[in-house]
Each structure stands twice: as structure tokens, then as C-alpha cells.
Amino acid sequence: MACAAATYIKANLTNLKVGLFLEMATTLGALTGLSWGVSWIGYSGPRAVALLV
């Protein structure tokens, strides 16, 4: 897979700035969702965990 990525970069078929922005946005969204989920379970208690399982 790394060879394929290198080929696209050499052919200028990638936009690294957009790719890095999307990667950072995905990470930020995952961390936000994690924090919301943990706080929701903390406020709701064991009943919320039982609903998820």
C-alpha cells in the first residue's frame, strides 16, 4: 500500500494539506465523541451502560 501512496504523491494526485486537515478533524471528532460518551455514562449511571449492552 505504501508504494501506491508514493506513486500518487509523485504524480501530484494528492492534496496533502486537505488530507492532514481531514485527519485532524477526524481525530478531534473521535476525541469529542469519547468525552461526550464518558460524561453521558457518568451522569446516567449503570442504567445507561445496561442499555448499551
Image (spheres, rainbow, N blue to C red):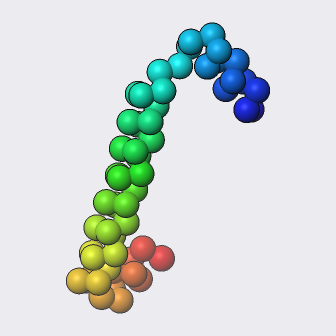
The answer to which image quadrant residue 17 occupies is top left
Measuring 36% from the left and 44% from the top, which residue is drawn there?
A: 25
Image spot of residue 47 (x, y percent): 33, 86
In this rendering, the answer to whether 34 lies above or below 11 is below
Image spot of residue 43 (x, y percent): 23, 83
Image spot of residue 29 (x, y percent): 35, 52
Query: Which of 43 and 27 lies nearest the eye of the viewer?
Result: 27
- On the picture, is 41 further left or further right than 43? right
Measuring 28% from the left and 67% from the top, which residue is drawn there?
A: 36
In this rendering, the answer to whether 52 lies above or below 30 is below
In this rendering, the answer to whether 28 lies above or below 50 is above
The answer to which image quadrant residue 30 occupies is bottom left
Image spot of residue 8 (x, y percent): 64, 17
Total residue callouts:
0
Measuring 56% from the left and 12% from the top, which residue is drawn there?
A: 12
Q: Residue furthest top?
A: 11
Measuring 42% from the left and 74% from the top, which residue is drawn there?
A: 52
| Quadrant where the N terminus is found in the figure | top right
Query: Which of 34 and 28 lies nearest the eye of the viewer?
Result: 28
Q: Residue furthest front?
A: 10
In this rendering, the answer to whether 50 lies above or below 36 is below
Q: Residue furthest bottom?
A: 46
Q: Residue furthest left?
A: 43
